[in-house]
Image: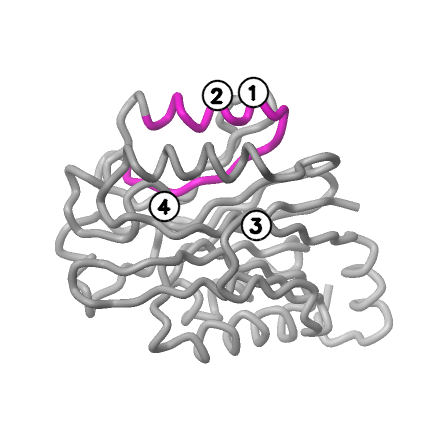
Amino acid sequence: MMKIGIFQYRMKWEDKKSNKSKILKILDISDLRGVDWIIFPEMSLSGFTTNIKIASLTDEDISFFVSLAKKYHINLSFGGVENKYNKFITLNRNGDRISEYSKINLFTPAREDKVYKKGKRIITFDMEGFSVTPFICFDLRFPENFMKVRLKTTLYVVIAAWPYSRIEHWTTLLRARSIENQSYVIGVNSIGEDNFGNEYKGYSCCYSPNGELVLDCQSREGTSIADINPETVFNTRENFKIIET
């Protein structure tokens, strides 16, 4: 079993100082007892932006998340830009970096591809008995990359800044990825508004390997907990064999 804390909060676009303060306040009132892993949305401190100076992670930004992992003795994932790559970074309970994924499918409608570098490889890492494959936002629309690693993946995690105007796509695609790969799928999204008038309302969620809704955060701020079990993945695949090993 693993307890995952999905962290969903109302960001101030491109205001890292304010967002760090907000994160600390929410964590201070969150019940994290027994939580194994907490996950933040895409570009966790700035919100999604093509302002590379703002989005790029400083040493201070990294230290902020390292200190949280150590303080709460919890695995932690967050998003931000390093060396022009839009990354999904994971720390262990000691604050050591154990995984980093660079977004492969850059969001061309927002000209993300003109600012950031394209990631080159899909990665998978171990987390508390699960084999986890991370993706970022627009990656969700490319099922072939999910399928490439479905034999070794028991949990997909997608961090995002997905606007409310396309929220039906978000929930539908997350569920589809869970059903077709018979894996848990977690999506962690933002709340707030950017300077272009895009509104984000969250709807972070978790789907089971059967496509059942395990957790729906709707537009709530805070840390919501999903309890998941790797045995559920193995049992689902054994009872309904659609994936050839």
| Residue 121 position within the rendered picture, expressed as x and y whole percent measured from the top left | 41, 49
User: Of callouts 3 and 4, which one flags the residue occurring earlier in the amino acid sequence?
Assistant: 3
Disc 1 marks a residue whose amino acid type is Lys
Question: Which sits earlier in the primary sequence, circle 1 or circle 3?
Answer: 3
Residue marked by disc 4? 102
Confirm or deny contact between disc 1 and disc 2 (CB under 8 A): yes
Which is more toward the observer, 77 or 233?
A: 77
Tag shown at residue 67 = 2
Q: Secondary structure at mark 2?
A: helix
Residue bearing the label numbered 1 = 70
Name the amino acid, label 2: Ser
Q: Residues within 10 Å of mark 2 (few under 14, many from 20)?
A: some
Q: Are marks 4 and 1 in contact (CB under 8 Å)?
A: no
Q: In 3D space, how far apart are the residues under numbered discs 4 and 1 (Cα atoms)?
A: 24 Å
Three-letter amino acid code at the position of disc 4: Ser
Q: Which residues are magenta?
A: 61-81
Q: CA distance from mark 1 to mark 3?
A: 18 Å
Q: CA distance from mark 1 to mark 2?
A: 5 Å
Q: Residue at x 58, y 28 (%)?
A: 92
x, y percent for residue 236: 80, 68
Q: Which residue is mark 3?
A: 6
The x and y percentages for residue 17 are: 28, 33
Q: Earlier in the sequence, mark 4 or mark 2?
A: 2
Amino acid marked by disc 3: Ile
Q: Position of residue 198 (x, y in %)?
A: 25, 67
